[in-house]
Image: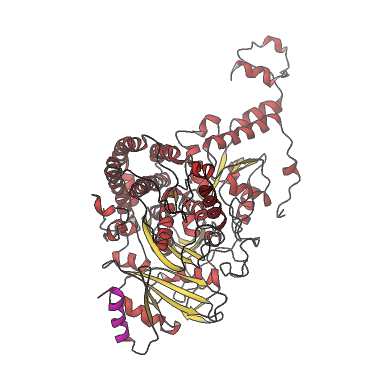
Amino acid sequence: MTTIEALRSDISARFPNGDFQYETVIGDNVLAIPKDAILPVLRHLKDTGRFDFLMHITATDYPERAKRFDIVYELFSSKTYNRLRVKCAVGENEKIDSAIPVWQSANWFEREVYDMFGIEFAGHPYLTRILCHHQFVGWPLRKDYDANHQQHCTDTLPIHFPEDPKYRPDPNKDLLPLNIGPSHPATHGTLRVMAELDGERVVRANVELGFLHRCFEKMAETHPYNQVIPYTDRLNYCSAPMNNVGYCKTVERLLGVEIPPKAQAMRVILCELSRIIDHIVCIGANAVDLGAITGFFHLFQYRELVYNLFEKLCGARLTVALTRVGGMAQDAPQGWFNEVLQFCDEMTIGVDELERMLSRNKIWMQRMQKVGAISADEAIMWGYTGPCLRSTGVALDLRKAQPYYGYDQLDFDIPVGTTGDCYDRYLVRVEEMRQSLKIIRQVCKNVPSGDYTIRDKAIVLPEKKDVYGNIEGLMNHFMLVMKGLRPPKGEIYDATEAANGELGFYLVSDGSGCPYRLKVRPPCFAIYQSFPKQVTGGLVADVITILGTMNLIAGELDR
Amino acid sequence: MATQNASSLGGRLDVGKDVTEIPQEIGYTTTLEKIAAWGQKNSLWPMPYGTACCGIELMSVMGPKYDLARFGAEVVRFSPRQSDLLIVAGTITEKMAPVILRVYQQMLEPKFVLSMGACASSGGFYRSYHVLQGVDKVIPVDVYVPGCPPTPEAVLDGIMTIQKMIEDHTPRPWKDNWKPGVWR
């Protein structure tokens, strides 16, 4: 029995009168339900143990429909690795029940949907704008909002906290409000943390985000498929090629094409190189925050080496836009794979030196151990993925769970921690760098021969010698540039294991040259949500440690 | 200081006695403005306002390979009151605009602004509802460095341009005519 049939029999036994539709769209299981049933259905799916992750909540706007919006819940199971998309149609002025009683992580996801579409969630405790500024009027991701209509913001919000009826300040204590960011060296970007301190202890905390909301999703709707790739670079800019790969993989699955083995191998190498340099930035910046600036200078040497490799491949250092739908932008230059192997040897020494410098360093251990510890259950409830989840002991890695690009043929391990504290996160990252080196070595030693891209005329531009050499090539080039590649109608959710965790793309195509809706599920959005809770009760100095080990990249957090 | 700089500083300092008696090895004569400009340009204290991808590339500029310290600008200050060069590295959104305005106003004179990258200079390819179309809409910018992100060499060149401006006392009408809170 397939998953969707099992689900059908299970849910129809529990909800015999429900008007539910079950289907499998391009390999994804979809369950469409009326909006009143959302809370009981989600609760049932969670309580029966079928799904333990709420990956994201988003919406799509269809202005011509009677019920204008589709609200989409993406569920995942860390045991069976099944996914399910639950959809409800909601009209313009209708409310839908908030999913917070079932999944705490729904809080920010719903705020984002409210911010972008103006859909209200009944029972949400703090339904305010999250990404756009507080003076913003209108709902930007609705189809009738012009992408180029800017609204100026003239002041910043004072220090504020969500209303909590349970919170009773002690009248005998004089609490000190503290604001960190959005321009602060330890936030590595544009995060704002607000706290109330009793001496050195944090009594309550809140965060404000959206200072780098660059409207990625709206930009994707106004650009052809291949032109979205440079925008994906700038999501997690510490490991840009991974975003390229994640996006292209989604579009390719929607198109139903498989890329050639050589392109797959190149993508794996790029992903693992990016994972290494992402962890370098994370650990290096962490070390700076805790006073060890040498670590940063030392690690950045190795980052420069990877930049050199990228530069040889495409000319750019940071924002590479290396992939295209259907494969890679170009072939690797001669000898490139050998240079990658050479880098692996240097980096192996680098990781050892890093460990010698930090792992047994007394200050480092005292600042990191038992700080920001989180249990596996709690982490799953918040929607943690990536190194932060694995540090709690959950061996969930999409490279093993849902292997792509031949990861199942490669020999590597998933490092896991035990306590989920900052020190474990650091150790997991260090070991992941070693495992990535192991993967790169294996791939580089047997690079498949053949083409670096598919040659489907409706998807990939012809080579320049054909464009200038014959009329078919010229016509093909012209048509593809003018009309763009056009995937079939449909929708899809696809995820890859990025450096920070699950990087998912939810893509809706209406058959035109631009995506109808593209939603990114950034890994650190869900992780950051638990931040106020994690720092409350701790020391103010630990705020910085926890912030650093979560590896928040404002580009993908705010999009 | 190298000997050839002595002539570029020019002039003669009035020290109350016959300056020809001071040997060239132990002293030079110049004007106060020039010696101040010389000192200022070689000890810029940048405030890295890294918001996005350019911030990561700015790390490389500070890092071991490109090493901004060679240009006398290694004392990175995150307090605007201690710095005289604001490096705007990354996209400035509408939400960030009032923050960067306040940061700029907190800086003490003389102050310079370097806009690093396409987003800070013009909004870049984010022609979208929440992105400020160039940081010069809120604060005056002295040097624009193109690129997305610019290479570290380009940023170094931008900083050297600012050094040249300081040395030459280049007039800056965009700054003199600027008023806070006016969106251009």
The part of the image, by quadrant, that contains residue B162 is: top right
Could you say which is closer to the camera, residue B79 or residue A489?
A: A489
In the rendered image of this protein, does residue A354 appear above or below residue A167?
above
Magenta span covers which residues? A1-13
Q: Residue at left 51%, top 55%?
A: A228
- A480 on left or right of A265: right
Q: Position of residue A49 (x, y in %)?
A: 28, 74
In the rendered image of this protein, does residue B20 appear above or below residue A487?
above
The N terminus of chain A sits in image quarter? bottom left
Q: Residue at left 29%, top 64%?
A: A376
Could you say which is closer to the camera, residue A448 or residue A313?
A: A448
Q: Position of residue B85 (x, y in %)?
A: 61, 40
In the rendered image of this protein, does residue B137 appear above or below residue A40?
above
The part of the image, by quadrant, that contains residue A497 is: bottom left
In the rendered image of this protein, does residue A482 appear above or below residue A350?
below
Q: Position of residue B25 (x, y in %)?
A: 60, 12
Does the segment drawn in magenta span residue A163?
A: no
